[in-house]
Amino acid sequence: MEALLGKTLAELQTIAIEAGLPRFVGKQLCEWIYRHRVTSFDEMSNISVKARQTLQEKYAIGRIKPTAEAVSVDGTRKYLFPVIVERDQSKVESQQVECVWLPEEDRTTLCVSTQAGCKMGCKFCMTGTLGFHGNLTTDAILAQVLYFPDLTNLVLMGEGEPMDNIDNVLRALNVLTSEWGLGWSPKRITVSTVGILQKSGVSALQRFLNETDCHLAISLHNAYPAERAAIMPAQKLTPVEEVLDIVRQYDWTHQRRLSFEYICWSGVNDDTSHAKQLIRLVQGLPCRVNLIRFHQTGDAERSMTAPQKEQRPTFPASDEQRMVAFRDYLSEHCVTCTIRKSRGEDILAACGMLVNALA
Ligand code: SF4
């Protein structure tokens, strides 16, 4: 059954008219679904019982509940959601994805999934070892957000590459940031990507930059192209230099934030040479670099299958001292740099660890 969640105001008005109902019922639906966050038609008290019955014959609200939850010692929570995904254009399948709820003193962030699994195959990422199981529909992306009443920030950094599901991601961002929708400020939403993907016509990244005001985070991890290609196959299709050509053409003066994600491996990408190359690459861009510790814990490895273990890099994570030195070198050369705190590592909820282990 088709979900109403994810539809625009105009689409809901069309649905009302096609069901033989007045156009204003579309506005009422919009308010019930996005403002009042109802989970059933029964709660729509200003829409007649007959009209609700007519709509229910063809549509569902589209809200979903998690089937499992894990709680970290640091308060982070990971949830497993049953979702409908699209594959091979029209095929629709049931899959599962994880999302992560991250409470902090001054904010509560949700790390949202946009695909079940991922086809990018980054060697350091456990999600990449799952392979690709489908694009989340717009309602499945939004249902993760709507389950949590207390969010202040969203990061689309869960399972999947958002630019590879750009149509549904843009639709979800439209609902999230429209006044008739969930009314989020785009400045509280960050979308992560390994880079643009070769699509016909306008690239996914260009569409994201043109059609939204949300922040952009680029997964970089190594500024030397050959070394990046060795851990991120996407580099071979879309060199990060090409990604930055597009990013450089964009006007970043309107409080829209650009950041680079950089996982640090000891003796691999955390020395002065790599810092210098990184500085050269981002030169002139108003950006921030976020250093991330590589998550390689015994517990995490134990829950992986043999092929997943094979795909993981064997090089060790950088220690705190090397990360601090790398950060300081960048800062001294006028590149804003922070070390991101790891969260939820004990429940496989930290960066690059989502493998539907709750399933
Ligand atoms: S890092 Fe992101 S793009 Fe790369 S495999 Fe993992 S989920 Fe996919």
Image (tube, rainbow, N blue to C red):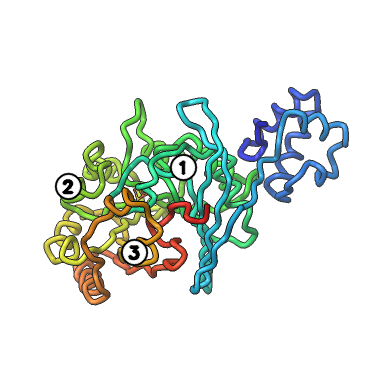
Tag nearer the camera, 3 or 2: 3
Q: Nearer the viewer, mark 1 or mark 3?
A: 3
Q: In this view of the protein, which residue sits in the foreground, 228 or 107?
A: 228
Look at mark 3 in the image and give the residue it sits on.
295
Amino acid tagged 2? Pro
Of the pair 253 and 346, the residue shown nearer to us: 346
Q: Secondary structure at mark 3?
A: loop
Task: Give left or right: position of 112 versus 181.
Answer: left
The single residue placed furthest to the left in the displayed view is: 273
Residue depicted at 64% across the width and 47% down the height? 64
Spatial CA distance of label 1 from label 3 is 22 Å
**Three-letter amino acid code of the residue under disc 3:** His
Tell me if the residue at label 3 has its CB under 8 Å from ligand 1: no
Q: Amino acid at mark 1?
A: Gln
Reading the image, the residue beneath label 2 is: 225
Q: Is mark 1 within 8 Å of ligand 1?
A: yes
- Can you tell which quarter of the image residue 354 is in? bottom left
**Residue on which the image places disc 1:** 115
Mark 1 or mark 3, which has the lower sequence index?
Answer: 1
Gap between marks 1 and 2, in whole Å?
Answer: 26 Å
Using the rendered image of the protein, determine whether residue 210 is visible from the camera's viewpoint: no
Compared to residue 323, the image places residue 15 above or below, namely above
* Dot 2 crowding, Cα within 10 Å, few <14, some 14–19, many 20+: some
User: Which sits earlier in the primary sequence, circle 1 or circle 2?
Assistant: 1
